[in-house]
Protein backbone atom coordinates (compact mmCIF):
# COMPACT_ATOMS: atom_id res chain seq x y z
CA UNK A 1 0.00 0.00 0.00
CA UNK A 2 1.38 3.39 -0.94
CA UNK A 3 1.40 5.98 1.81
CA UNK A 4 -0.63 8.93 0.61
CA UNK A 5 1.73 11.42 2.27
CA UNK A 6 4.63 10.27 0.08
CA UNK A 7 2.77 10.16 -3.20
CA UNK A 8 0.40 13.07 -3.18
CA UNK A 9 3.27 15.39 -4.13
CA UNK A 10 2.68 15.68 -7.89
CA UNK A 11 0.64 18.67 -9.03
CA UNK A 12 -0.84 18.01 -12.49
CA UNK A 13 0.46 20.44 -15.09
CA UNK A 14 -1.87 22.42 -17.38
CA UNK A 15 -4.83 20.55 -15.89
CA UNK A 16 -7.48 23.17 -16.76
CA UNK A 17 -6.17 23.45 -20.30
CA UNK A 18 -6.20 19.68 -20.84
CA UNK A 19 -9.76 19.44 -19.51
CA UNK A 20 -10.88 22.41 -21.60
CA UNK A 21 -9.49 20.82 -24.75
CA UNK A 22 -10.75 17.30 -24.06
CA UNK A 23 -14.12 18.61 -22.84
CA UNK A 24 -14.96 15.20 -21.33
CA UNK A 25 -18.64 14.23 -21.41
CA UNK A 26 -20.53 11.57 -19.44
CA UNK A 27 -19.68 8.01 -20.53
CA UNK A 28 -16.75 8.92 -22.78
CA UNK A 29 -13.50 6.90 -22.66
CA UNK A 30 -9.99 8.35 -22.48
CA UNK A 31 -6.43 6.99 -22.41
CA UNK A 32 -3.86 8.53 -20.10
CA UNK A 33 -0.51 7.22 -21.39
CA UNK A 34 1.38 8.71 -18.42
CA UNK A 35 -0.80 8.05 -15.41
CA UNK A 36 1.70 9.33 -12.79
CA UNK A 37 -0.14 10.38 -9.64
CA UNK A 38 -3.43 10.22 -11.54
CA UNK A 39 -4.03 13.98 -11.46
CA UNK A 40 -5.31 14.29 -15.03
CA UNK A 41 -7.09 10.93 -14.95
CA UNK A 42 -8.99 11.76 -11.75
CA UNK A 43 -10.19 15.06 -13.24
CA UNK A 44 -11.36 13.28 -16.41
CA UNK A 45 -13.13 10.55 -14.42
CA UNK A 46 -15.03 13.16 -12.44
CA UNK A 47 -16.61 14.37 -15.67
CA UNK A 48 -17.21 11.07 -17.44
CA UNK A 49 -19.44 9.23 -14.98
CA UNK A 50 -21.38 7.12 -14.58
CA UNK A 51 -19.70 4.70 -16.98
CA UNK A 52 -16.91 6.52 -18.85
CA UNK A 53 -13.50 4.95 -18.30
CA UNK A 54 -9.85 5.93 -18.29
CA UNK A 55 -7.19 3.46 -19.35
CA UNK A 56 -4.09 4.69 -17.52
CA UNK A 57 -0.60 3.44 -18.36
CA UNK A 58 2.64 3.87 -16.44
CA UNK A 59 5.98 2.10 -16.28
CA UNK A 60 6.24 2.85 -12.59
CA UNK A 61 4.46 0.54 -10.18
CA UNK A 62 4.36 3.23 -7.47
CA UNK A 63 2.67 5.65 -9.87
CA UNK A 64 -0.05 3.10 -10.59
CA UNK A 65 -0.67 2.62 -6.86
CA UNK A 66 -0.69 6.36 -6.24
CA UNK A 67 -3.18 6.95 -9.05
CA UNK A 68 -5.47 4.19 -7.80
CA UNK A 69 -5.31 5.72 -4.34
CA UNK A 70 -6.17 9.15 -5.70
CA UNK A 71 -9.18 7.85 -7.61
CA UNK A 72 -10.39 5.79 -4.67
CA UNK A 73 -10.16 8.81 -2.38
CA UNK A 74 -12.25 10.90 -4.73
CA UNK A 75 -14.68 8.00 -5.07
CA UNK A 76 -15.01 7.94 -1.27
CA UNK A 77 -15.52 11.68 -1.28
CA UNK A 78 -18.59 11.24 -3.51
CA UNK A 79 -20.26 9.79 -0.36
CA UNK A 80 -22.26 7.64 -2.74
CA UNK A 81 -21.43 4.25 -1.22
CA UNK A 82 -23.45 2.44 -3.86
CA UNK A 83 -21.29 3.88 -6.64
CA UNK A 84 -17.92 3.88 -4.92
CA UNK A 85 -16.86 0.55 -6.44
CA UNK A 86 -17.98 1.66 -9.87
CA UNK A 87 -15.97 4.88 -9.55
CA UNK A 88 -12.79 2.97 -8.69
CA UNK A 89 -13.47 0.45 -11.46
CA UNK A 90 -13.63 3.25 -14.04
CA UNK A 91 -9.84 3.56 -13.88
CA UNK A 92 -8.11 0.68 -15.62
CA UNK A 93 -4.50 1.06 -14.55
CA UNK A 94 -1.92 -0.90 -16.53
CA UNK A 95 1.77 -1.23 -15.85
CA UNK A 96 3.44 -0.92 -19.22
CA UNK A 97 5.27 1.23 -21.71
CA UNK A 98 3.16 3.60 -23.81
CA UNK A 99 5.25 2.62 -26.82
CA UNK A 100 3.06 -0.54 -26.76
CA UNK A 101 -0.10 1.58 -26.75
CA UNK A 102 -2.03 -0.36 -29.41
CA UNK A 103 -1.38 -3.72 -27.77
CA UNK A 104 -2.29 -2.44 -24.32
CA UNK A 105 -5.53 -0.90 -25.62
CA UNK A 106 -6.49 -4.07 -27.49
CA UNK A 107 -5.54 -6.43 -24.65
CA UNK A 108 -7.87 -4.46 -22.40
CA UNK A 109 -10.70 -4.37 -24.99
CA UNK A 110 -10.70 -0.61 -24.63
CA UNK A 111 -12.76 1.10 -27.32
CA UNK A 112 -14.41 4.36 -28.38
CA UNK A 113 -11.53 6.57 -27.31
CA UNK A 114 -12.40 10.28 -27.21
CA UNK A 115 -9.01 11.53 -26.06
CA UNK A 116 -5.44 10.42 -25.49
CA UNK A 117 -3.07 12.27 -23.17
CA UNK A 118 0.71 12.19 -22.94
CA UNK A 119 2.17 14.19 -20.05
CA UNK A 120 5.79 13.39 -20.72
CA UNK A 121 8.82 12.84 -18.52
CA UNK A 122 8.73 12.07 -14.83
CA UNK A 123 6.60 13.00 -11.85
CA UNK A 124 7.60 14.86 -8.69
CA UNK A 125 7.09 11.58 -6.85
CA UNK A 126 9.71 9.91 -9.04
CA UNK A 127 12.02 12.88 -8.65
CA UNK A 128 11.83 12.53 -4.87
CA UNK A 129 12.10 8.74 -4.90
CA UNK A 130 15.40 7.94 -3.21
CA UNK A 131 15.77 4.75 -5.21
CA UNK A 132 15.45 6.19 -8.69
CA UNK A 133 18.44 8.52 -8.75
CA UNK A 134 16.69 11.09 -10.97
CA UNK A 135 17.73 14.09 -8.90
CA UNK A 136 21.18 15.45 -8.21
CA UNK A 137 19.79 16.85 -4.97
CA UNK A 138 19.55 13.43 -3.26
CA UNK A 139 22.29 10.85 -2.93
CA UNK A 140 20.94 7.72 -4.57
CA UNK A 141 22.05 4.83 -6.76
CA UNK A 142 22.43 5.92 -10.39
CA UNK A 143 19.42 4.10 -11.82
CA UNK A 144 17.11 6.66 -13.51
CA UNK A 145 14.76 4.10 -15.09
CA UNK A 146 11.05 4.83 -14.72
CA UNK A 147 10.35 1.08 -14.70
CA UNK A 148 12.53 -1.95 -14.08
CA UNK A 149 13.57 -2.82 -17.60
CA UNK A 150 16.53 -1.68 -19.65
CA UNK A 151 19.96 -0.33 -18.93
CA UNK A 152 20.63 1.81 -15.83
CA UNK A 153 22.43 5.14 -15.78
CA UNK A 154 25.17 3.45 -13.73
CA UNK A 155 25.82 0.99 -16.55
CA UNK A 156 25.96 3.82 -19.07
CA UNK A 157 28.32 5.93 -16.97
CA UNK A 158 30.70 3.06 -16.19
CA UNK A 159 30.69 1.08 -19.43
CA UNK A 160 30.14 3.45 -22.35
CA UNK A 161 33.09 4.81 -24.33
CA UNK A 162 34.11 8.45 -23.86
CA UNK A 163 32.79 9.41 -27.30
CA UNK A 164 29.45 7.71 -26.65
CA UNK A 165 29.04 9.57 -23.35
CA UNK A 166 29.91 12.85 -25.03
CA UNK A 167 27.29 12.22 -27.72
CA UNK A 168 24.62 11.42 -25.12
CA UNK A 169 25.33 14.59 -23.14
CA UNK A 170 25.38 16.73 -26.29
CA UNK A 171 22.37 15.20 -28.04
CA UNK A 172 19.97 14.82 -25.13
CA UNK A 173 21.24 17.51 -22.78
CA UNK A 174 22.64 20.11 -25.19
CA UNK A 175 25.46 20.32 -22.61
CA UNK A 176 28.20 22.71 -23.70
CA UNK A 177 30.92 20.92 -21.67
CA UNK A 178 30.00 17.46 -22.97
CA UNK A 179 33.56 16.60 -24.06
CA UNK A 180 35.25 17.46 -20.78
CA UNK A 181 32.56 15.83 -18.70
CA UNK A 182 32.83 12.58 -20.68
CA UNK A 183 36.63 12.68 -20.29
CA UNK A 184 36.60 13.21 -16.52
CA UNK A 185 34.00 10.47 -16.04
CA UNK A 186 36.31 8.03 -17.84
CA UNK A 187 39.25 9.12 -15.65
CA UNK A 188 37.35 8.93 -12.38
CA UNK A 189 35.86 5.51 -13.12
CA UNK A 190 39.35 4.04 -13.76
CA UNK A 191 40.00 4.50 -10.02
CA UNK A 192 36.57 3.41 -8.82
CA UNK A 193 33.15 2.94 -10.51
CA UNK A 194 30.74 5.89 -10.25
CA UNK A 195 27.71 4.41 -8.53
CA UNK A 196 25.71 7.24 -7.01
CA UNK A 197 24.20 10.57 -8.01
CA UNK A 198 26.54 12.48 -5.68
CA UNK A 199 29.62 10.69 -7.09
CA UNK A 200 28.53 11.73 -10.56
CA UNK A 201 27.91 15.33 -9.46
CA UNK A 202 31.38 15.47 -7.90
CA UNK A 203 32.99 14.15 -11.09
CA UNK A 204 31.17 16.78 -13.18
CA UNK A 205 32.11 19.54 -10.72
CA UNK A 206 35.80 18.92 -11.41
CA UNK A 207 35.53 20.24 -14.98
CA UNK A 208 32.85 22.93 -14.75
CA UNK A 209 34.40 26.40 -14.65
CA UNK A 210 33.84 28.16 -11.31
CA UNK A 211 31.51 30.83 -12.70
CA UNK A 212 29.09 28.14 -13.95
CA UNK A 213 29.04 26.29 -10.64
CA UNK A 214 26.86 28.82 -8.86
CA UNK A 215 24.36 29.75 -11.60
CA UNK A 216 20.57 29.68 -11.35
CA UNK A 217 20.53 26.28 -12.99
CA UNK A 218 22.53 23.52 -11.29
CA UNK A 219 25.60 22.57 -13.33
CA UNK A 220 24.61 18.87 -13.39
CA UNK A 221 21.08 19.51 -14.72
CA UNK A 222 21.81 18.83 -18.38
CA UNK A 223 23.86 15.68 -17.81
CA UNK A 224 21.09 14.28 -15.60
CA UNK A 225 18.46 15.17 -18.21
CA UNK A 226 20.53 13.55 -20.97
CA UNK A 227 21.07 10.33 -19.04
CA UNK A 228 17.40 10.10 -18.10
CA UNK A 229 16.24 10.61 -21.68
CA UNK A 230 18.75 8.06 -22.97
CA UNK A 231 18.10 5.40 -20.33
CA UNK A 232 14.32 5.61 -20.78
CA UNK A 233 14.50 6.01 -24.59
CA UNK A 234 12.12 8.90 -24.15
CA UNK A 235 12.38 10.37 -27.64
CA UNK A 236 12.02 7.02 -29.41
CA UNK A 237 9.01 6.13 -27.27
CA UNK A 238 7.38 9.41 -28.20
CA UNK A 239 7.99 8.90 -31.93
CA UNK A 240 6.56 5.39 -31.70
CA UNK A 241 3.42 6.24 -29.72
CA UNK A 242 2.17 9.25 -31.72
CA UNK A 243 1.01 7.39 -34.88
CA UNK A 244 -0.58 4.67 -32.75
CA UNK A 245 -2.50 7.30 -30.81
CA UNK A 246 -4.06 8.77 -33.95
CA UNK A 247 -5.11 5.36 -35.22
CA UNK A 248 -6.83 4.56 -31.93
CA UNK A 249 -8.87 7.76 -31.59
CA UNK A 250 -12.49 8.09 -32.66
CA UNK A 251 -12.98 10.67 -35.43
CA UNK A 252 -13.24 13.99 -33.61
CA UNK A 253 -11.17 12.55 -30.73
CA UNK A 254 -8.31 14.62 -29.37
CA UNK A 255 -4.63 13.96 -28.86
CA UNK A 256 -2.97 16.16 -26.22
CA UNK A 257 0.76 16.15 -25.52
CA UNK A 258 2.51 18.03 -22.73
CA UNK A 259 6.27 18.26 -23.24
CA UNK A 260 8.95 19.74 -21.01
CA UNK A 261 11.88 20.42 -23.31
CA UNK A 262 12.52 21.44 -26.87
CA UNK A 263 13.65 17.99 -28.05
CA UNK A 264 10.24 16.54 -27.22
CA UNK A 265 8.25 19.53 -28.36
CA UNK A 266 10.00 19.48 -31.75
CA UNK A 267 8.96 15.86 -32.31
CA UNK A 268 5.33 16.62 -31.47
CA UNK A 269 5.26 19.79 -33.56
CA UNK A 270 6.77 18.09 -36.63
CA UNK A 271 4.48 15.09 -36.27
CA UNK A 272 1.35 17.27 -36.00
CA UNK A 273 2.47 19.33 -38.99
CA UNK A 274 3.08 16.30 -41.17
CA UNK A 275 -0.12 14.51 -40.19
CA UNK A 276 -2.24 17.59 -40.78
CA UNK A 277 -1.19 17.80 -44.45
CA UNK A 278 -2.69 16.08 -47.46
CA UNK A 279 0.59 16.12 -49.35
CA UNK A 280 4.05 15.75 -47.86
CA UNK A 281 6.01 15.70 -51.15
CA UNK A 282 9.14 17.88 -51.27
CA UNK A 283 8.38 21.44 -52.45
CA UNK A 284 10.22 20.86 -55.76
CA UNK A 285 7.82 18.07 -56.78
CA UNK A 286 5.37 19.54 -59.36
CA UNK A 287 2.76 16.78 -58.90
CA UNK A 288 1.93 15.00 -55.69
CA UNK A 289 3.24 11.46 -55.57
CA UNK A 290 2.94 10.67 -51.89
CA UNK A 291 -0.81 9.98 -51.59
CA UNK A 292 -0.53 11.13 -48.01
CA UNK A 293 -3.85 12.08 -46.45
CA UNK A 294 -4.22 14.42 -43.48
CA UNK A 295 -5.28 12.57 -40.35
CA UNK A 296 -5.27 15.48 -37.91
CA UNK A 297 -6.31 19.06 -37.52
CA UNK A 298 -4.02 21.13 -35.34
CA UNK A 299 -5.98 23.06 -32.73
CA UNK A 300 -3.35 25.49 -31.58
CA UNK A 301 -0.62 26.79 -33.90
CA UNK A 302 1.39 27.96 -30.90
CA UNK A 303 1.72 25.62 -27.92
CA UNK A 304 -0.37 26.37 -24.85
CA UNK A 305 1.81 27.35 -21.90
CA UNK A 306 0.94 27.65 -18.20
CA UNK A 307 -0.59 30.88 -16.93
CA UNK A 308 1.61 32.95 -14.65
CA UNK A 309 -0.33 31.80 -11.60
CA UNK A 310 0.31 28.13 -12.33
CA UNK A 311 4.03 28.65 -12.92
CA UNK A 312 4.26 30.40 -9.54
CA UNK A 313 2.51 27.63 -7.62
CA UNK A 314 4.17 24.82 -9.51
CA UNK A 315 7.69 25.67 -10.74
CA UNK A 316 7.83 22.29 -12.52
CA UNK A 317 5.21 23.61 -14.96
CA UNK A 318 7.38 26.51 -16.17
CA UNK A 319 8.79 24.74 -19.20
CA UNK A 320 5.57 22.87 -20.07
CA UNK A 321 4.05 23.12 -23.55
CA UNK A 322 0.74 21.61 -24.54
CA UNK A 323 -0.14 20.79 -28.15
CA UNK A 324 -3.55 19.46 -29.11
CA UNK A 325 -4.87 18.01 -32.37
CA UNK A 326 -8.20 16.54 -33.46
CA UNK A 327 -8.45 13.28 -35.38
CA UNK A 328 -10.20 13.83 -38.70
C1 LIG B 1 4.71 13.88 -15.70
S1 LIG B 1 4.29 12.34 -15.04
C2 LIG B 1 2.55 12.25 -15.28
C3 LIG B 1 1.78 12.93 -14.19
C4 LIG B 1 0.29 12.77 -14.30
N1 LIG B 1 -0.25 13.34 -15.51
C5 LIG B 1 -0.40 13.43 -13.10
O1 LIG B 1 -0.93 14.53 -13.26
O2 LIG B 1 -0.36 12.89 -12.01
C6 LIG B 1 4.86 11.24 -16.26
C7 LIG B 1 4.65 9.77 -15.93
O3 LIG B 1 4.87 9.03 -17.13
C8 LIG B 1 5.56 7.84 -16.83
N2 LIG B 1 6.23 7.44 -18.07
C9 LIG B 1 7.27 8.04 -18.68
N3 LIG B 1 7.58 7.40 -19.81
C10 LIG B 1 6.70 6.37 -19.93
C11 LIG B 1 6.49 5.37 -20.92
N4 LIG B 1 7.26 5.28 -22.00
N5 LIG B 1 5.48 4.49 -20.73
C12 LIG B 1 4.68 4.58 -19.62
N6 LIG B 1 4.84 5.51 -18.67
C13 LIG B 1 5.83 6.40 -18.82
C14 LIG B 1 6.46 8.19 -15.68
O4 LIG B 1 6.79 7.04 -14.95
C15 LIG B 1 5.60 9.20 -14.90
O5 LIG B 1 4.89 8.56 -13.88
Image: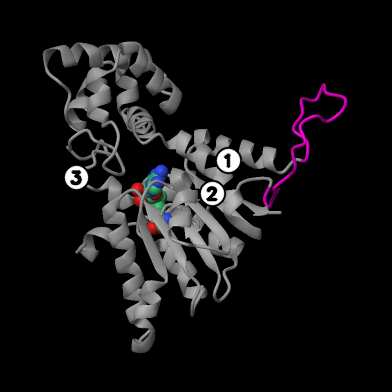
Residue at point 52%, 37% (across, down):
239
Q: Which residue is mark 3?
A: 130
Neighbour tally class for label 2: few under 14, some 14-19, many 20 plus, Cα within 10 Å? many
Residue 46 locus on image (x, y percent): 47, 74
Q: Quadrant of the N terminus?
A: bottom left
Q: Which residues are magenta?
A: 278-300
- Answer with mark 3 or mark 2, whichever residue precedes in sequence: 3
Q: Marks 2 and 1: CB-CB under 8 Å?
A: yes
| Number of callouts | 3
Q: Which residue is mark 1?
A: 268
Q: How is the image coloured?
A: one colour
Q: Is residue 267 visible?
A: yes
Quick one: SS at disc 2? strand
Residue at point 23%, 13% (across, down):
186
Neighbour tally class for label 1: few under 14, some 14-19, many 20 plus, Cα within 10 Å? many
Q: Quadrant of the C terminus?
A: bottom right
Residue 241 locus on image (x, y percent): 51, 43
Residue 287: in magenta span: yes
Residue 204: in magenta span: no
Q: Which residue is mark 2?
A: 257
Left or right: 29 in relation to 327: left
What is the CA distance from the residue labelled 2 to the residue labelled 1? 8 Å
- Answer with mark 2 or mark 1, whichever residue precedes in sequence: 2
Q: Marks 1 and 3: CB-CB under 8 Å?
A: no
Amino acid sequence: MVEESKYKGHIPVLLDEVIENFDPKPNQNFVDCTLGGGGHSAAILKLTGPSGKVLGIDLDEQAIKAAELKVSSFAKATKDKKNEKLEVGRLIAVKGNFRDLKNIVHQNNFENISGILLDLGFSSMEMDDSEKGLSFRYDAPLDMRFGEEGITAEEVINNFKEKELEDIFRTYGEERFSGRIARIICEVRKEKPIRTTFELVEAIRKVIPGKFQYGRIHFATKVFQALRIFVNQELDNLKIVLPQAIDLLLPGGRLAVISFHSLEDRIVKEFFKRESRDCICPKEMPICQCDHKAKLKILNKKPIIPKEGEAKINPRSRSAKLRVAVKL
